[in-house]
């Protein structure tokens, strides 16, 4: 409980900073909304010409984009620090978080807010409300599922960024991994063959970030919902375990210092 | 063996680092056997003990192992071997518990939120340290009083001067009333006045609350004015451990003698044995007597014979010279046993 | 000069060369990281798009969409992606030069500022394009198999690509020159890249756009810069070539004039403000 209050305070401080530079903040939010809008416009063009591909229509792709942008937006809008971990490990900037009594990975994750993420989330929610025209049941499912999906994304970012404990510089690897997850999460599941799906339900978990939530919004299934919650919990705990294991190897910039 | 009474006790602590591989080939280090070189030893077995309430300075040239030591004692790094207790805890195993009792001030790194007023950081830290609202308010009030922060708390940190920021930094570090404070180069980059203020506050903290102070610095005055004891590290080993006053005599042998003459005097041709000229102006000469404890009488007598002396001072060399002498000793550690009983 | 001194100088020179080599290698290391990132992004993109088009061709039960086969479609997106990913952000550099006052400095040197910028842009763009197209071709080959390209068509595509590179320099440099008047050119550049993604036909050829959208796309310079060269390489036809070249030349004239006028009046502002 105290931890939640502490996290809430962090988010509030991030917001205060963002609002101190209102114009720049708004520009970044707007840019992301335009970016997402362009993609949805592409899909609109596409489905104008090909009304149905593998059983997917424009509404399905709108759901994919609404859930995807909201989940990714929430993850980087609230926990934007996750994607900075690799760089901080390499430069020895973890020290500050290690001398404080709260779990360092929690600190790190909420230490930064990405204004683009806010744009993503706003776009996703607006798209869902106006283009998908959801029923009340769909809306409730959406609200729950995006939070679960967002937590899987954060766990994924923490895990891939933690590679830096072993590999030294890993920000490029982590960036590639995140790009892959985003890309696969924004296309229909049925485009992919079974071996590819096997990857998408494991190492690049687009299945749990996008495919399962999209299916659940359309048609609720308690079994799949339970699986999703389990995956989210497991990946959060797993990523923290990876981070903590890496922490034992943390060199705190001493390698760099000693080279000089 | 390790008693819980000491603030810090360190026994045979070692740490080595893997050498980084080829630049830009980070991923290759993932492969078994990678491109890793032989490990570099940052800390040879190091042992020392700091009592509660002591004020200790850790000094040494860059790369001597000071930062590694502090990072091990705060739980940031895991050691390669050996044992340490800080306030009775093993730092790398009980890092979180220890964090409630210690504070760190890194002169070059800020924990204040740059774009927000310091008060916001304090409020955040209250949640980080799980402090009651009432306790935190009292504590902030107290620190505001002592550090003179009244007009600073509500201005965005980026608008503060370096000295003002450092005062807020200190307050942020002390908000949870730590029992042991680590200061890593706390006065670096500050102007004279701000340096003195920081030193005064640290001394006062120690005097009022018995807080143990453990600092690293290259600044002689930080050491002289704040600390009573010095640990010198060289090439990953403790080279000296003892009172500040003994440090001087250990590293710089000899004393300086300065003479002022009534009238200009010609530069001397010969010097008395064991003395050398440091600086000569027509009416002021500065000499050094090499051997510690060597009688200065003959040199003084010789000076008197050179001309009409109006003033004469015999002094120890300044701390800067002492530190410079320590840093010059790069050839290897010269372990001086028993600075302390 | 004594032999001893000569040896000293040789040693010195060797040291200097060594130091430069190391710095260059390190630089290369950073560059390789960027290339690896670009390569991975290209791979994921092409893979997903090829999945999409495979499914679309299957659903349409047709072997030709917008005049392209599935294999050609995969190579089409490879070519458009390579064009887009080789883009060099000159706008940011020009923007920085204006804000930091480097521009005023550069004006003192012989040779026009924009000419120098163009040279650097072209070199970097060609290298990036070669890498993107080379790597993309390997991916496309693995995903869809080889494609037959008519040599005459290739020549037409090369001419169009060259013109497109020049036109895009004028556009991007023009955005950078916006720094004379506005605070934030980076969001204009970002918007430009997004709009060209859609209206350039990067993901879907203009032929497959709904009619109204196709008309808009053809009227703007994005399509001839991206869709044009890619299309010419894969499904050549004489009138297509002429119309692409014609719209590139017209766009280049219009945008080039605008950029030149903007540059001139920007420089006047610079002198008025005292640089």
Image (spheres, coloured by chain):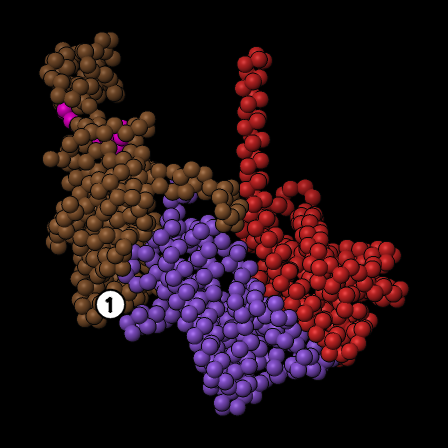
Q: Which residues are magenta?
A: B313-326
| Quarter of the picture holding the C terminus of chain A | top left
Q: What color was chain A assigned in the picture? A: purple
**From the viewer's perspective, is C48 left or right of B207?**
right
**Relative vertical location of residue C237 with respect to residue B216 in this rendering, above or below:** below
Q: Position of residue B63 (x, y in %)?
A: 34, 38
Q: What color was chain C assigned in the picture? A: red
Residue A79 at least partly seen: no
Q: Position of residue B140 (x, y in %)?
A: 21, 64
- Residue pictured at 80% horizontal, 69% vertical: C68
Q: What color was chain B assigned in the picture? A: brown
Badge count: 1
**Residue at the spot of label 1:** B130
Q: Quadrant of residue A231?
A: bottom left
**Relative vertical location of residue B73 with respect to residue B114 in this rendering, above or below:** above
- Residue pictured at 44% horizontal, 72% vertical: A232
């Amino acid at each position: 409980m105290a931890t939640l209050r502490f996290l809430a305070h962090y988010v509030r401080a991030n917001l205060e900073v963002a609002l101190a530079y209102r114009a720049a903040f708004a520009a970044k939010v707007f840019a992301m909304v335009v970016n997402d809008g362009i993609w949805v416009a592409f899909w609109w063009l596409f489905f104008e010409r090909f009304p149905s591909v593998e059983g997917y229509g424009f509404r399905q792709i709108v759901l994919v984009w609404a859930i995807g942008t909201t989940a990714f937006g929430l993850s980087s809008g609230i926990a934007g620090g996750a994607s900075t971990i690799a760089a901080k490990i390499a430069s020895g900037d973890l020290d500050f978080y290690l001398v404080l009594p709260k779990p360092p990975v929690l600190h790190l994750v909420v230490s930064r807010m990405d204004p683009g993420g806010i744009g993503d989330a706003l776009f996703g929610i607006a798209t869902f409300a106006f283009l998908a025209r959801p029923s009340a049941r769909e809306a409730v499912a959406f609200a729950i599922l995006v939070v679960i999906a967002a937590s899987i994304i954060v766990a994924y970012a923490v895990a891939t960024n933690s590679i830096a404990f072993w590999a030294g510089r890993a920000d490029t690897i982590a960036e590639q991994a995140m790009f892959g997850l985003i890309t696969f999460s924004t296309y229909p599941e049925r485009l992919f063959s079974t071996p590819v799906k096997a990857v998408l339900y494991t190492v690049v978990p687009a299945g749990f970030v996008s495919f399962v939530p999209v299916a659940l919004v359309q048609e609720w299934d308690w079994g799949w919902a339970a699986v999703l919650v389990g995956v989210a919990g497991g990946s959060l705990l797993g990523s923290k375990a990876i981070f903590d294991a890496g922490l034992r190897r943390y060199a705190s910039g001493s390698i760099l210092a000693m080279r000089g | 063996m390790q008693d819980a009474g000491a603030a810090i006790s360190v026994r045979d602590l070692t740490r080595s680092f893997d050498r980084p591989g080829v630049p830009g080939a980070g991923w290759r280090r993932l492969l078994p056997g990678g491109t890793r070189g032989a490990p570099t030893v940052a800390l040879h077995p190091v042992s020392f003990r700091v009592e509660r309430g002591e004020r200790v300075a850790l000094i040494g040239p860059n790369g001597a192992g000071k930062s590694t030591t502090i990072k091990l004692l705060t739980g940031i790094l895991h050691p390669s071997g050996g044992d340490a207790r800080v306030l009775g805890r093993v730092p790398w195993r009980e890092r979180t518990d220890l964090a409630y009792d210690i504070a760190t001030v890194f002169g070059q790194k800020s924990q204040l939120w740059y774009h927000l007023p310091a008060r916001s950081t304090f409020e955040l830290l209250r949640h980080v340290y799980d402090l009651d609202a009432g306790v935190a308010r009292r504590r902030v009030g107290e620190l505001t009083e002592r550090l003179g922060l009244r007009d600073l708390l509500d201005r965005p940190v980026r608008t503060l001067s370096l000295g003002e920021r450092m005062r807020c930094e200190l307050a942020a570090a002390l908000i949870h009333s730590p029992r042991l404070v680590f200061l890593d180069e706390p006065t670096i980059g500050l102007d004279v006045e701000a340096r003195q203020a920081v030193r005064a506050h640290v001394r006062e903290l120690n005097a009022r609350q018995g807080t143990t102070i453990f600092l690293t610095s290259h600044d002689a005055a930080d050491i002289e004015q704040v600390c009573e004891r010095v640990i010198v590290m060289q090439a990953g080993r403790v080279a000296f451990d003892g009172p500040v006053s003994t440090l001087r005599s250990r590293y710089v042998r000899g004393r300086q003698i300065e003479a002022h003459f009534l009238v200009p005097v010609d530069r001397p041709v010969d010097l008395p044995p064991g003395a050398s000229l440091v600086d000569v102006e027509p009416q002021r000469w500065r000499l050094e007597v090499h051997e510690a404890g060597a009688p200065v009488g003959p040199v003084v007598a010789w000076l008197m014979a050179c001309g009409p002396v109006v003033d004469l001072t015999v002094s120890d060399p300044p701390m800067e010279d002492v530190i410079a002498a320590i840093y010059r000793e790069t050839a290897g550690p010269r372990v001086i046993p028993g600075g302390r009983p | 000069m004594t032999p001893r001194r000569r040896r000293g100088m040789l040693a010195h020179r060797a040291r200097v060369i060594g130091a430069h080599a190391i710095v260059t290698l390190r630089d290369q290391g950073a560059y390789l990281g960027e290339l690896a990132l670009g390569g991975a992004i290209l791979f994921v993109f092409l893979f997903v798009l090829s999945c999409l088009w495979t499914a679309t061709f299957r659903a349409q039960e047709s072997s030709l969409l917008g005049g392209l086969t599935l294999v050609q479609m995969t190579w089409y997106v490879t070519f458009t992606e390579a064009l887009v990913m080789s883009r060099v952000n000159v706008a940011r550099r020009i923007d920085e030069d204006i804000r930091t006052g480097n521009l005023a400095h550069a004006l003192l040197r012989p040779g026009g500022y924009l000419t120098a910028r163009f040279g650097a842009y072209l070199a970097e763009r060609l290298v990036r394009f070669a890498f993107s197209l080379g790597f993309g071709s390997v991916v496309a080959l693995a995903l869809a198999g080889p494609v037959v390209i008519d040599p005459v068509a290739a020549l037409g595509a090369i001419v169009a690509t060259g013109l497109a590179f020049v036109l895009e320099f004028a556009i991007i440099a023009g955005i950078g020159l916006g720094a004379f008047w506005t605070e934030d050119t980076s969001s204009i550049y970002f918007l430009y890249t997004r709009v060209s993604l859609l209206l350039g036909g990067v993901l879907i050829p203009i032929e497959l756009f709904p009619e109204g959208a196709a008309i808009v796309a053809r009227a703007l310079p994005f399509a001839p810069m991206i869709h044009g060269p890619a299309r010419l390489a894969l499904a050549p036809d004489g009138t297509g070539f002429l119309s692409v070249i014609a719209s590139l030349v017209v766009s280049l004239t219009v945008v080039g004039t605008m950029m030149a006028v903007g540059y001139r009046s920007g420089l006047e502002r610079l002198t008025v403000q005292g640089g």
